[in-house]
Image (cartoon, helix red, strand yellow):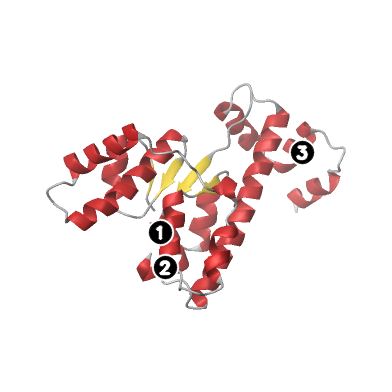
Amino acid sequence: MKVISSRILIDTSVLIDLLRGNISDSIWLKTLEGRAPSVSPITVHELRRGVAPNSKWEQQIDQLLPRESILTAPPITEDWIEAADVIRIYFGKSRSKIELAALAHDVLIGLTARAMKAELWSRDKDFKVICAAVKISLLDH
Amino acid sequence: MKNTAKKQKLSRSSSPSEVISARLSKSEILSLRKLYPGSSNQDIVEKLVEEKLARRDFQIWLSSLRKAVDDNALDLDQV
């Protein structure tokens, strides 16, 4: 039987907190123990939005991330429908149109974790609702 | 110290079971057996290597992100 690695999908909110020094090395290392870290293409996209134009990092920021560390579960029509339903049912009346659009990213990250059987680590409080809705467990420390 | 002593016993010709017993405690081995029933020692070694490489490569990428932040080339408020 082929062993499937224990993957953890790390949300953008965790990376931002880590880069800001809001996550200690001990918590980081302990959480990654026995797990292969990965990110969603959405996180790659979100990080890239923050790169200064014409800086050397425009090239380097994506190239240094091993492609094996990017968990890609293609959002198919059913995923977009499920994402819409989660947003409509749990967030619809409480958020602005712009926030609702951003939430689609978060739900798709949750659906990627579910499809790839990866654990999800996020510090964004919306993920508590999203993970409950799509029936996956969440690490939120 | 104990791990270092065990590590020195390993060589290129070490078998998967030798690698596992040198690198993991008995409770860790039991946990892996429970997690992946039916896995061979070779499978478990491959898993350990895969995870270790993934963590190492990810750390390298994170270091580059830190440098980009320090260079003011990555604005976390825009992420």
Q: Residue furthest left?
A: A93
Question: In the rendered view, would you say B59 is above or below A68?
Answer: below
Q: Mark 2 lies on which chain?
A: A
Relative horizontal placement of residue A27, taking residue A127 as reference (left or right) = right
Mark 3 vs mark 2, CA separation in Å: 43 Å
Q: Is residue A135 visible?
A: no
Q: Is residue B4 left or right of residue A40?
A: right
Q: Disc 1 on helix, strand or loop?
A: helix
Q: On the same chain: label 1 and label 2?
A: yes
Instruction: Report which residue position mark 1 lands on.
Output: A46
Which one is nearer the viewer's eye here, A110 or B33? A110
The residues bearing labels 1 and 2 have C-alpha atoms spaced at a distance of: 7 Å
The amino acid sitting under disc 3 is Val
**Eye-nearest disc, 3 or 1:** 1
Tags 1 and 2 in contact by the CB under 8 Å rule? yes
Quadrant of the snapshot with the N terminus of chain A: top right
Q: Which mark, by number, is residue A4?
A: none
Q: Residue B26 location in percent, x, y?
A: 66, 35
